[in-house]
Amino acid sequence: MEKTINLTLRVWRQNGPSDHGRFVTYEAKDIDTAMSFLEMLDVINTSLEKKGEDPIAFDHDCREGICGMCSAVINGQAHGPEMGTTLCQLHMRRFNDGDTLVIEPWRAKAFPVIKDLVVDRSAFDRIIKAGGYISVRTGGAPDAHSIPIAREKAEEAMDAAACIGCGACVASCPNASAMLFVAAKVSQFALLPQGHPERESRALAMVEQMDKEGFGNCSNHYECEAACPKEISVRNIARLNREFLRARVLV
Ligand code: SF4
Ligand code: FES
């Protein structure tokens, strides 16, 4: 059944990286609860543009939970209140009439704000460039099928490969640690033979780049796992620690 709600939005507005930024309050009237959260922002932006005001800048692309572009903190929760859900897959039916939503960008030194809700996540690209690849030719499906891999390992690798690089783990961590992201990227290759030629160099180089980018250290709060829209397990962080120690001994 169609339903509309009225909300008060307190949105972080920041003109550019050197602007101090501030919260601006908007009244969101007659919001259809069938809308996604990003469609609601589209509606607000249309009304701002009609008034000649600057629309709220926010990141998005696929709007189907796979690209990792959407990113905002709602009432203190990265990607909002729905567990295992990206911001673009969050629907307005999750909120109640009269709610106040405080909407902010990811907050982390390594993710500087570009404008409003848009942050610079190129630190993740540089970590991937440091070691998030394999050099072997994997061939086609028959080649892959000819390599025996234990089902449990294959499934763990697939689970780690589900990371979309959104950065919610960093935004939710009190230390702004990128360990869950790096752990997922190291794990997906460490678990499979195709990832083994660079196994040691990958763990060392990706951790080194992570530290250079200014992310904090992991102190086991597990907020990253709770905020992750792909439900990447913190067990991957334990694996990353083992992979790093193993590489330090072998290299
Ligand atoms: S581990 Fe989860 S929260 Fe972190 S970047 Fe990957 S998908 Fe996003
Ligand atoms: S817009 Fe692609 S994951 Fe949300």
Image (cartoon, grey):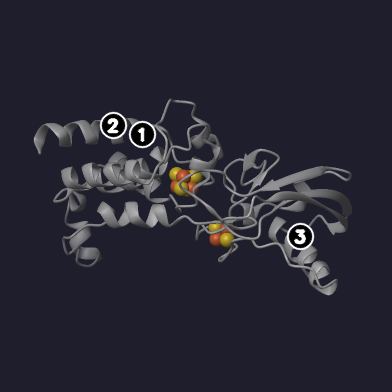
Q: Which residue is mark 3?
A: 40
- How far is disc 3 from disc 1 in space, using C-alphas? 36 Å
Secondary structure state at the residue bearing disc 1: helix
The amino acid type, in three-letter code, at marker 1 is: Ile
**x and y percent of residue 187 in the render?**
30, 43
Left/right placement of residue 89 relative to residue 102 reads: left
Residue at the image point whose x is 54% and y is 42% from the top: 171
The amino acid type, in three-letter code, at marker 2 is: Asn
Q: Nearer the viewer, residue 150 or 158?
A: 158
Q: Residues within 10 Å of mark 3 (few under 14, many from 20)?
A: some
Residue at the image point whose x is 24% and y is 42% from the top: 203
**x and y percent of residue 5 in the render?**
88, 52
Answer whether labels 3 and 2 touch (C-beta < 8 Å). no
Q: Which residue is mark 1?
A: 237
Q: Residues within 10 Å of mark 1 (few under 14, many from 20)?
A: many
Left/right placement of residue 224 relative to residue 191 reads: right
Which quadrant of the rendered structure holds the N terminus?
Answer: bottom right
3 or 2: tag closer to the N-terminus: 3
Tell me if the residue at label 2 has its CB under 8 Å from ligand 1.
no
Is 235 drawn above or below residue 195 in the view shown?
A: above
Q: Which residue is mark 2?
A: 241
- How far is disc 2 from disc 1 in space, using C-alphas? 6 Å
- How far is disc 3 from disc 2 in space, using C-alphas? 41 Å
Residue at the image point whose x is 49% and y is 48% from the top: 167
Tell me if the residue at label 1 has its CB under 8 Å from ligand 1.
no
